[in-house]
């Protein structure tokens, strides 16, 4: 009951920034062991207070699951969201567009770099990572965007896939640059949630396979409280 009360409590303040991230657990469903995503949402109020907004368990790539989760947050009072920071889950991006209309999406820079470097041969990764980082070192959105185009042009001949991925993601990886400078360091990745997820993983690894999705919620919910 304590976890349920925490998960369904009303959300009072405005939360301009919201982070969403998933950790994965093995759960027994209809006799089979399947991987399920435990999604956690944290938000920061206009006063700068960080809060756990919600938690749920379901299939991570499904738009319906994300839509229901985000709708439940709105139903409980989530408002004033200006930027949502998450990884590029298929269903999640669509759900953000549907439910949190008017909010900008920031693709987690750390996850993006991993995906980008995976398109390169091992030997080239370190040097190109350093070149890509020059984009994020620019003083503002306009110069960062110009540098991104410059870097993509330089990569195009030898690494066309990498260049295309970079250009495709341009708006999504630089969205945070449109927000106050003092906040930007926290806004470009899901890092504010990573530590929490590590702790969830540490506790859940002891269990191994959960008997039901409710069992995951009970453990994770208790930890988040």
Image (cartoon, grey):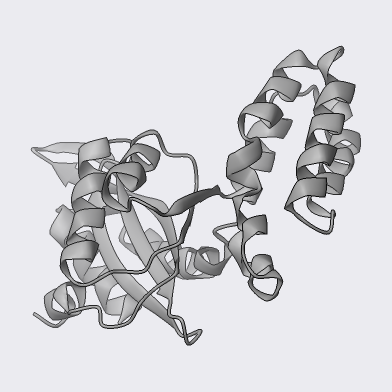
Is 195 on the left-hand or right-hand side of 121? left
Residue 171 sits in which quadrant? top right
Q: Nearer the viewer, residue 36 or 22?
A: 22
* Residue 4: image location, x then y, percent: 13, 74
Q: Nearer the viewer, residue 49 or 58?
A: 49
Q: Is residue 163 visible?
A: yes
Q: Residue at x 43, y 80 (%)?
A: 45
* Residue 193: image location, x then y, percent: 50, 66
Q: Is residue 53 above or below residue 187?
A: below
Residue 12 sits in which quadrant? bottom left
Q: Residue at x 15, y 73 (%)?
A: 8
Q: Nearer the viewer, residue 206 or 90?
A: 90
* Residue 159: image location, x then y, percent: 80, 17
Q: Residue at x 70, y 23 (%)?
A: 119
Quarter that holds the C terminus: bottom left
Q: Is residue 155 above or below residue 80?
A: above
Is 214 on the left-hand or right-hand side of 154? left
Q: Residue at x 26, y 72 (%)?
A: 221
Is 183 on the left-hand or right-hand side of 71? right
């Amino acid at each position: 009951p304590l976890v349920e009360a925490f998960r369904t409590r009303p959300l009072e303040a405005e939360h301009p920034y919201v982070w969403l991230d998933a950790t994965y657990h093995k759960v027994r469903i209809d006799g089979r062991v399947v991987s399920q995503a435990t999604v956690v949402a944290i938000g920061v109020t206009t006063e700068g207070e960080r809060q756990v907004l919600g938690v749920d368990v379901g299939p991570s790539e499904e738009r319906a699951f994300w839509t229901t989760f985000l709708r439940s947050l709105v139903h409980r009072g989530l408002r004033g969201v200006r930027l949502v920071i998450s990884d590029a889950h298929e269903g999640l991006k669509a759900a953000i567009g549907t439910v949190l209309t008017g909010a900008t999406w920031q693709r987690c820079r750390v996850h993006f770099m991993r995906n980008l470097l995976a398109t390169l041969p091992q030997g080239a990764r370190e040097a190109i990572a350093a070149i890509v980082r020059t984009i994020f070192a620019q003083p503002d959105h306009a110069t960062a965007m110009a540098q991104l185009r410059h870097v993509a042009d330089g990569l195009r001949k030898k690494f066309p896939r990498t260049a295309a991925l970079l250009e495709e993601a341009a708006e999504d990886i630089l969205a945070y640059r449109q927000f106050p400078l003092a906040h930007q360091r926290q806004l470009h990745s899901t890092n504010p949630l990573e530590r929490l997820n590590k702790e969830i993983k540490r506790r859940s690894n002891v269990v191994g396979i959960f008997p039901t999705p409710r069992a995951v919620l009970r453990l994770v919910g208790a930890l988040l409280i």
